[in-house]
Amino acid sequence: MTGTDWEAANAWFLSASLTWLRLLLIQHSDVQHGENGMTPPDAVAPKEPPRRRLFGRHDEPAPAPPAPSAPRERVTADQLAAAADAVRQAEASNPPPALVALAERLELTRFERDTLLLCAAVELDPPIAALCAAAQGNPAMTYPTFGLAMSLLPGAAWEVVSPHRGLRYWRLIELTGRAAQGVVGSPLRVDERIVNYLKGLNHLDDRLAPLVSRLDPAAGTGLPPSQQAVVDEIGRHWHAAGPGPVVQLAGADEQGKRLVAAHAAVSRGMVVQRLSATLLPTAPTELDELARLWQREAQLLPLALYLDVEDGGVVDYAGQTHASVTRFLGRISCPTVFAARESWSELGRQSLVLDVEPPTPAERVVAWRSVLGPSAPQAEIDSLAAQFALEVPAILDVAAVSGGDAVEAWRVCRARTRPRMDSLAQRLEPKVGWEDIVLPPDGLALLRRIAEQVPQRAKVYDAWGFGDRITRGLGVSVLFAGPSGVGKTMAAEVLARQLRLDLYRIDLSAVVSKYIGETEKNLRRLFDAAEGGGAILLFDEADALFGKRTEVKDSHDRYANIEINFLLQRMEAYRGLAILATNMRGALDGAFLRRLRFIVDFSFPGTAERKEIWRRAFPEKAPREDLDFDRLAQLQTSGGMTRNIALNAAFLAAARGSGITMPIVLDAARAEFEKLELPTRARDFAWEATS
């Protein structure tokens, strides 16, 4: 049956049902007013209209009652039988009409179904309100009640009024009267969502719509084999009778988990709606109302729930969020996906834990090759697949934006995976390269080894199988140790420029917190944000964060050690490039040193290095006038000091309207030494030009 055919069949059923109900109400009204000795209300002779009392006196006459209507024919048994037969024929359509389907899904009895029809009839056919008043013998009672239903409909049962029975439990109807009217005499109002459903308008309840968002698989894209296997496993459990266990999707790949859930729902003919756990109410009554509303909606629509616990933040597993989650899941029984970084042992229902990882580098290579075409260089494709842990739909988007160009695709990936560090880190724009940095040969060789190792991780770990034997330390962690101003930050910029990645310098003042647990939360946010692959983390002054663990003497020592233990574990789990820079190597915890891949010592530059640093300190465009780099190299300056002196000399020269000369550079050098309170001798900064 097509959608149009079903709409016609549903309309036919409603028309037949309302006709049958009208006849029942008319017959009931006749019986009440006839056989019980009561005069029908439309046969009462009009009396002299009473006068309305206004402001304590009888002023104007009240409106006259309506004129009596013409006598109507009594409803016969044959008419009722014919109407009931028409209802039975209409409800036999396949698929069944909305009211019949609703009764089956919510396990309503025939009497409960008819009671719901009576309540909805006032909304579907407004003239029925007058028939309700006539049937109840009170012109003011233009509404249905449980009392009317039990006296009017066949198969009446008192338990229908119970709050645990279907009509009230599922909030299909609500009592709108005063307490004095009691449950049986209170007006009944049908829920708006149910009225729309009976009409054939089956849309998500307006009360749920602001809380959830629909997850859809990307059109025209499939999943890689590793994720499709998880989808198939979910389908096997959802295919069984009943809602099945809660499927826990664990792992850090939030987008991957959502794609897996969306594909699993589509494979079972369902729609999955995402609900953030932070939106769950904490009050038990409100939580129960939400659970019933969701469970009812899952009966009316082919819905699955994706309960997102992480939602971009860290969940307090011992607090209210955990309690609300377990209560909520214990009160619903529809197909449910529970998404968290780590699985929970207690959810209030039986659960199945499945890990979801991003597509493997080999799967990403296949995806990149399919979208960039055979002309794209294999080296570029391997680099894209190794560096950026993107899902297949994201790879398709990048290819569309970049126009199929591999180099442009790298730039788009870098921008797309740029982490949201908030105030925890500062992004540095790398502006220096290998030609700008001056280091001893050993240090420079180590830097080049780091730059060569980062893009080869996929080949070594995946293609060559080393990743099968190593469970941690798959990233590259580096320590830059040396005094201030010797080029540690510059070296990090050189690596970022070589690798074409963003460099983030961590602001320790924003990360470290005096409140217990806050530092770990901030660090987790940092590492999680950088996991996409497009960032290098630079922990400047790392000894403040990665210091040695101490003997536990009080609670502060214990929690400080917990922070360091967390850092040890998180550094090993991080798959990107993390650089630790420190002036005090000896202050670092020994466990960090053992886990570092490289340690580069930056020593104070010697005379030869200082001369080369001076030579590179002035850009080609700068107007230099016979600078004596041998003389400048005699000054005991670090790389950072040299950069400051060169910049200040340029400003002095610009202010004087001249080029950068030796006297100007020496004047700037004297000011730098005095600023740092270093010893100065007049002859070190005096300049006598030689002929």
Image (cartoon, rainbow, N blue to C red):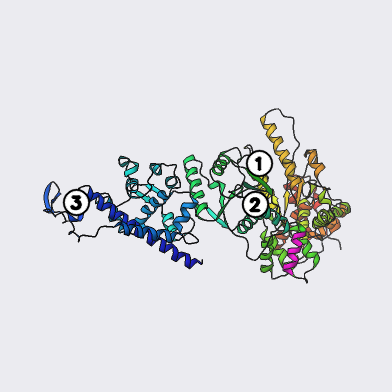
Give the image location of residue 424, x and y in percent.
65, 48
In the displayed structure image, the side of residue 5 where residue 50 appears, left or right: left
Whether residue 596 can be seen here: yes
Q: Secondary structure at mark 1?
A: helix
Q: Are marks 3 and 2 in contact (CB under 8 Å)?
A: no
Residue of label 1: 519
Mark 1 and mark 2 in contact (Cβ < 8 Å)? no
In the drawing, what numbered circle is on residue 421?
A: 2
Q: Which residues are magenta?
A: 362-372
**What crowding class fits label 2: few (fewer than 14 Cα within 10 Å), some (14-19), or many (20 or more)?**
some
The amino acid type found where label 3 is placed reads: Thr
The kind of secondary structure element at disc 2 is loop
Query: Residue at 40% across / 49% down in the picture?
Result: 111
Please give left or right for residue 522 compared with residue 298 in the image: right
Of the numbered discs in the image, which one, if any, rests on residue 626?
A: none
Which residue was labeled with disc 3?
39
